[in-house]
């Protein structure tokens, strides 16, 4: 069994509890205007050709985005960092892109890691068929669930898809006994409006097994990625999210979860 990923990141501290190894899967059904991983959009392997200036010379280059990984290699890679998990109560996180676009591999990876005694987390947008979402999330110790925009029309405008399936999957999730973390991107005048934050807070009132809320302030580090991929980036004019507003939103959600963090 194999999958296509675009990165493996060791010593991650922003993708769940403790020190983690995060596997980033290629392919995503959404096109969020603020996406920081545009290399994840396409599900297959990609070849990128271009040129770079080196002094007075122009040097052509070809770059491959993505690589094929076997299930055994993934499990071996997770096992290699076990010492760091045990010391920090960490584990592995499967992210993307949207990892559930490669659901068969993801479920097998989660099951294999749990069998080996490694804590597992699944980072998902929730935009996946209900039966797939339910089957795979039950194999994870922890689910990191993205909540972006509650208004259906605005969600479609800024992500390209309806949010109905996402909300249906989230409402199913909170009826289970699975621990989960909510991740909310903070994008000026898009996700941080009073109406949107209130709607998210109202939704979370029903959640019993929420471990924390991770607020993810917008920053401009993705601009270079879009340039390298030859893609346009509609938010390249937007400054990084102000620190004072980060603190305000953090305080706003303080009573919605045991812990609220500001991510990188």
Image (cartoon, rainbow, N blue to C red):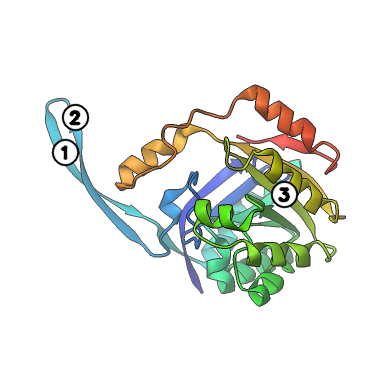
Badge 3 local density, few (<14 within 10 Å), some, or many (20+)? Answer: many
Label 2: element kind: strand
x, y percent for residue 198 = 75, 44
Badge 2 local density, few (<14 within 10 Å), some, or many (20+)? Answer: few
Verify CB contact (< 8 Å) between mark 1 and mark 2: yes
Does the rendering let one see residue 135? Answer: yes
Please identify the quarter of the rendering in which residue 46 is found. bottom left
Label disc, if present, on residue 54 of the rendered structure: 2
Q: Residue at x 62, y 66 (%)?
A: 109
Nearest to viewer (mark 3 / mark 2): 3
The earlier-in-sequence mark between 3 and 1 is: 1
Label 3: element kind: strand
x, y percent for residue 238 = 47, 32
Q: Give the residue at mark 3.
A: 182
The earlier-in-sequence mark between 3 and 2 is: 2
184 relative position to 198: left or right: left
Label disc, if present, on residue 59 of the rendered structure: 1
């Amino acid at each position: 069994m194999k999958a296509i990923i675009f990165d493996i990141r060791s010593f991650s501290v922003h993708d769940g509890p403790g020190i983690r190894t995060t596997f980033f899967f290629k392919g995503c059904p959404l096109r969020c205007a603020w996406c920081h991983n545009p290399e994840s959009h396409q599900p297959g392997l990609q070849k990128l050709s271009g040129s770079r200036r080196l002094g007075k010379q122009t040097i052509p280059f070809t770059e491959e985005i993505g690589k094929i990984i076997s299930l055994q290699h993934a499990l071996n890679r997770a096992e290699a960092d076990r010492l760091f998990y045990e010391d920090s109560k960490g584990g592995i996180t499967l992210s993307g892109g949207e990892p559930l676009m490669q659901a068969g591999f993801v479920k097998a990876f989660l099951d294999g890691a749990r069998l080996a005694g490694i804590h597992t987390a699944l980072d998902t947008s929730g935009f996946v068929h209900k039966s797939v979402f339910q089957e795979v999330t039950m194999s994870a110790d922890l689910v990191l669930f993205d909540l972006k925009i509650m208004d259906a029309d605005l969600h479609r405008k800024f992500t390209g898809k309806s949010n109905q399936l996402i909300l249906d999957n989230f409402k199913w999730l909170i009826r289970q006994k699975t621990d989960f973390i909510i991740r909310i991107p903070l994008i000026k005048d898009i996700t941080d409006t009073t109406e949107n934050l209130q709607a998210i807070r109202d939704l979370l009132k029903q959640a019993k097994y929420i471990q924390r809320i991770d607020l993810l302030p917008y920053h401009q580090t993705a601009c270079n990625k879009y340039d390298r991929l030859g893609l346009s980036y509609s938010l390249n004019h937007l400054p990084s999210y102000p620190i004072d507003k980060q603190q305000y939103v953090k305080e706003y959600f303080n009573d919605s979860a045991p812990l609220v963090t500001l991510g990188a």
